[in-house]
Image (cartoon, rainbow, N blue to C red):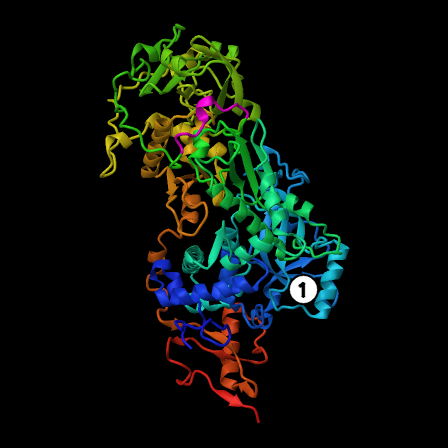
Amino acid sequence: MTATSSTVWRPFYDEPLFVPELLHGPDTVPGLLRDRIVGYLTRVAEIRRAPLHTCTAFNALHFGFDLDAHGYRAEVLAPDLFVQVAAEQQERPVLPVGTFVHIDRGGRRSLLAEVVARYGADPAVDDDGWVPAALSGAPPGRDEPDGTRTGVERVILDVEAFGAPLTAADYTELDRLRRRGQVLDARGHLTGPVHYPAGNGGRDDVALYGAYLLGPARPLLLGGPLGGLLTDPGDGRVLTAALHQALRTIDQLLDTARTLRRWHGYAISRARFKQRRRVGWPGLPAADVDDVVGAVRRSGPQPRYTGVWPLLAARVAGDGMDADPLELAGAADVLVHTNLTAADLVAEAIDGLLPGGVHLRVDDVWQAGGLWRAQREPIPATVLAADPRTPLGLGHQPAVQDSLEPSETGSASSAGGRQPAPPEPPAEHGVPKGEETIPGEDGTPGEDAAAGEEPGENLSDLVVVRDSLVVYTVALRESHWNAGELPLPEQAADVLADGLLIMQLHHDGETLDESEQIQRISRDGTVLTGISWPWSFYPGIKVTVAAARNATRLSVTTTLLDQPLPYGDHYRWETNTAILAAAIGADQPPPQPTAPPEAPEPLPVNTSQRHRGVPQLRGLIIAALRRHGAPGAFQARRLTGPQLLAALFGPDLVAPPLMWEVIYTCDRLVDAGKLTKESGATSPGRLGSGGPDVFVWWPDDTARRNAHQNTPRDAVLAGRVREHWVPPFCRLLQPGHQASDTARQAYAAWVVEVRGPDADTNLPAGYTFVRGQLRGAGESAGLLRLAAEP
């Protein structure tokens, strides 16, 4: 039977449904084939207790989840290749969703399982669901001295993934493991400390699972159909591109499935969701789920962060007397249903507000089964501008934590369309009307004067944008360093809000203490006071400052030089050398020829001047991303335009024109190769996929290349995929038949090739082996002979 047949796919009977089209993107999958893949995955989602995830959907297609047997075929997959989980293990590595595990208690009995969900279980989460704001969106775990992290996770296993129901012996072993509490908790979950490798965010299951399959599980991966679809599966670059493309294609096929509902990587049957909304689960009626959703709506004077898991756990006795819907794989099903119920509620909010003037949004989909943020009016427009089903991690980001009261103008009357429209074209950024250039860097007396202290004397690169943004550079004198002061040009003093201010300081190339990075300061006329400058600062060092109208936060950064100044290795930042030389008693370096002012860099084709952005903001934007960005693979940091505006100028600033200036500046950084951009275009069927574009900072070019080696996937895979090819696979035999010697020999040669010389070369009992062939060629070309038993 071919892969395009309209019947539901039967692994180990039919040809593999993991076909070459999956390696070319979702747009290349024909309609009939798409329907068959989605139909099969929908049946898997309906049969299993746990929701599907992109990773487990990949497993079902690649390793073959048998609908009749209600599980994978362990005899074909070689469990010795699974991750071994020992009962005595105190700290384990990350087990991403999709991982096959072998739980070994050291005796004769063991259990096989598949990781079907994974959530944070930080002990700081209270039993009533209350969560410290700083935990929401935070990287998992705590920093260790060696650069790694250690945290606590709840890993939900499906112990019936290799056949349901369990045998009596397996039930006995499972019950023993749950009672002992050494490897599984009372609900059958793998809960405990986890060790995260250095440089890994620890949250992205698709990225983590892909790395696992390409690393220690490579023999397991090559034993499936993917390797057979490649002309050279030993080429790591090609294999990586093929795996990532297959995961992406499967993910988007799940997105477009009308029979499924999605929640951030997970997928459940739409029919099952409707049924659960009506009747709930044994031990957890639908009314209790509604009560949990009502609890996450609780708010106070400050935003409240509430975890879903502890609220559900409190609703279920879990004492063994009644059914416990949170035990084993069913816990993942309940969590996804509850979060979808809350998501449906916020989708119906008018202008982003629920009755009572409460804005509810998911802020973290990983910690405690999902953290929801509830806030009463007024709401910052930058928060309302984002889809409430898209997690922003507002709690963790110091720049957008709610240490400041929202301004009255923060109410979201302008947020009806979720993202404000671009403003009218701002003034040009050369020397527009109302913009002033202060003497300094161009060889004017302001640069060379070392004795005067007049305000503005050492200011340079002053830019005023539409009377709402001031960016300037100032060289600090020794008196500024000693007194804890920062001079302000009049234009900046005019735009800043009254009262206490927050200064966010970034020292390029240096790690500052938290108390130095975020400082509460005051303003006295044209001077900011109460600043604690870092000890590595010195007279003459230049800082770039950005201040926005009515903002309570200003951003300050230094700029690291490629080479230290001639006065010593300590002097490594952009500096007014005249001030520095006078302060340390050194000779001034000979004056350098005055270079002509640099012409503005050309804009990309079809980009207007209104989209140039503010070049002086670039360093500050990169600094904000490095400090506040959501962590990702290869130490990347991600923020949206609204998040960057809040990071630079505080969460209470409502300034759509300024937000667009930030976005335009980010776009120009993308053009210059300093950032990358991930489109926020809506993906049909996926909740929260219609948010703003995400800008990504990478620590170096190597990280960018490693993370984006899948970008030219089509180029990498060109000519490397066997088109119209059926990869090798094991087929179940009908009763009364056995595999031929030719099939056994072919299997032995194949398994040594993909799994190594130590692999078991015996063909599993009850199976034959079908070698790779052109689709539609059948088995008539001498590739296989079935011999009847005597």
The residue shown at (55%, 35%) is: 374
Q: Which residues are magenta?
A: 403-415
User: Can residue 390 be seen from the camera position used here?
Assistant: no
Query: Where residue 393 sits in the image (x, y, percent)?
Result: 52, 37
- Quarter that holds the C terminus: bottom right
Residue 530 in the image: state x and y as whole percent. 53, 13
Q: Measured along the vertical axis of the image, is residue 202 above or below residue 132?
A: below
User: Disc 1 on helix, strand or loop?
Assistant: strand
Nearest the viewer among 581 and 145 is 145
Q: Taking 589 as reference, is 598 left or right?
A: left
The quadrant of the rendering that contains the N terminus is bottom left
**Coordinates of residue 404 in the picture (x, y in percent):** 53, 23
- 638 vs 90, left or right, is left
Q: Look at the magenta stretch and give its main secondary structure.
A: loop
Residue highlighted by disc 1: 111
In this rendering, position of residue 453 left or right of residue 762? left
Q: Nearer the viewer, residue 567 or 218?
A: 218
At which x and y percent is residue 455? Answer: 39, 8
Residue 537 in view, yes or no = yes
Residue 228, picture quadrant: bottom left
* Kind of residue at badge 1: Leu
Residue depicted at 25% across the width and 34% down the height: 603
**Residue nearest the observer in this picture, 294 or 199:** 294
